[in-house]
Amino acid sequence: MKPIDLRSDTVTKPSVGMRRVMMDADVGDDVYGEDPTVNRLESLAAEMLGTETALFCTSGTQSNLLALMAQCERGDEYIVGQYAHTYRYEGGGAAVLGSIQPQPLDFEEDGTLNLKKVSGAIKPDDHHYARTKLFCLENTHMGKVLPIDYLKAAKNLADDKGLMMHLDGARVFNASVKLGVDVKEITRYFDTISCCLSKGLGAPVGSVLCGSVETIKKARRWRKLLGGGMRQAGILAAGGIYALTHNIERLKDDHANAMELAKGLARINGIEVNAKIVQTNILFADIKADMKKLCSFMKERGVIIDSSNHLRLVTHLDISEEDIEETLKAFREFLVKPF
Ligand SMILES: *Cc1c(COP(=O)(O)O)cnc(C)c1O
C-alpha cells in the first residue's frame, strides 16, 4: 500500500508522464549554456513569472542564497521575517557565504511584515550601520497567502527607500491559484523571485530564480562558485517544464484536500485546528496526545506525520480525497482510545 505521507509537499514522486519527458529530454552541457532543455525551462519560467530571464538552481535554498548574493554585497543587509526560510532554515548561508547581515522582524498573523516596522528597521546612511539593501517576503508563508494590496504597499515602500525586493516564492503558485490570479499579479512587485519546482509542482529536483538579465548574470556566477553548475541537467529541467505545464491548476485540489482534512480534524475531540485559517495546502493542528505514540499509531495505518508538538500537515499531488478519509479515520481511532 502506498503510504499517505503528509509531512511535506517535497515528498512527491515524479509521475509516469513526468518520468517519460525526463527520459526523452534533449541534453547538452549547461555550464557551456548548451543544454536545450535547461534553456527552455529558464525561458518558460521567466515568461510565466514575468521577468527578463531565469536560472535553474539545485534547490530553493540555493536559489534564495543566489538572490541575496546577487543583490547584496559584503556589509549589506536584508530585511526578513523571523521565521522566514531565507533567514531561519538556510543554515545562515547569507551570513556564512555572502557576509550579508539579516535584519529579522516578527511576522504578523497573516504572514506579512508590518511596513512601519520595516521602515523603522532601515538603517540610515551612516558608517555605523550595515547598508540596508533588500526586502524579502515569503508567499505563501506557512500556507498563508499575502494580499495583493499588501504587496503593492511593500513595493511602494521599497521604491521610496531604494530597496530591492526578493520573493521567496517556494509555493508562489499555491498563492496565485488560491487568489485566482495570474502569478505575474504577485511577482510583478519583486526584482527577484525564487520558485520551487520540487514541492507541490511535483518535480524531483530544482528551483528557478527569476529576475533581470543583470542580476541573473551575477547569480549564475555565484551558482558556479557554489558548485551548482550542472552539466546534462536537462534531464532534471524536463521534469521542471512538465511541472510548470501540467501541475499548477491542480494545486486547487491540494487546497481542497487540506480544507477537508482541517474540517474533519476540527470535529474530533482533542484536536485543535482552525479550519478558517487554512488557505492553501498546509495546516497546523494541536493535539492533546503523546506525539511519539500518535506517530507510530498512524504509521501502522499507513499515514506518515511529523512528531513535532505543533502538528503540520501538508497535502500534495500524491494525496487523494480517499487518503484524507483514511487519515481522518486513523486520527479518530487514535483519539477514541488514546493510550
Ligand atoms: C522548501 C522551501 C524553500 C527551499 O527549500 P529547498 O528544500 O532548499 O528546495 C524555501 N523557502 C520556503 C518557504 C520553503 O518552504
Image (cartoon, rainbow, N blue to C red):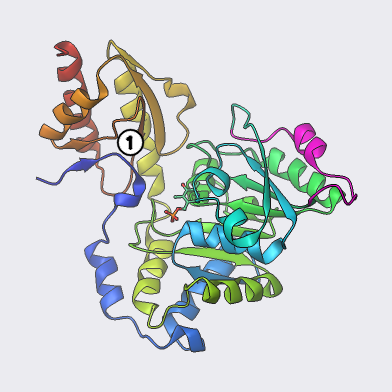
Residue 139 shows in this picture:
no
Magenta span: predominant SS is loop
Residue at x 20%, y 40% (from the top left corner): 4
Query: Where's the N terminus, which quadrant?
Result: top left
Range covered by the magenta-colored residues:
111-130
Residue 11, compared with residue 211, is above or below; it is above
Q: Tag 1, which secondary structure?
A: helix
Describe residue 269's horizontal placement relative to residue 229 as left or right.
left
Residue 162 percent across, percent down from the top left: 84, 54
Q: Residue at x 88, y 52 (%)?
A: 127
Q: Is residue 108 visible?
A: yes
x, y (%) of residue 257? 33, 36
In the rendering, at what x and y percent does residue 176 appear? 54, 48
Q: Is residue 34 above or below residue 119?
A: below
71, 96: nearer the viewer: 96
Between residues 311 and 43, which one lies in front from this camera angle? 311
Q: Quadrant of residue 222?
A: bottom right
Q: On the rendered image, what quadrant is the C terminus found in?
A: top left
Q: Is residue 185 above or below residue 267?
A: below
* Count of numbered tags: 1
Residue 274 falls inside the magenta stretch: no
Q: Quadrant of residue 290?
A: top left
Q: Residues within 10 Å of mark 1 (few under 14, many from 20)?
A: many
Name which residue lies at 19% across and 35% down: 303
Name the residue that disc number 1 marks: 257
Q: Quadrant of residue 191?
A: bottom right
Report the amino acid beneath label 1.
Asn
Give the percent coordinates (x, y) of residue 223: 54, 72
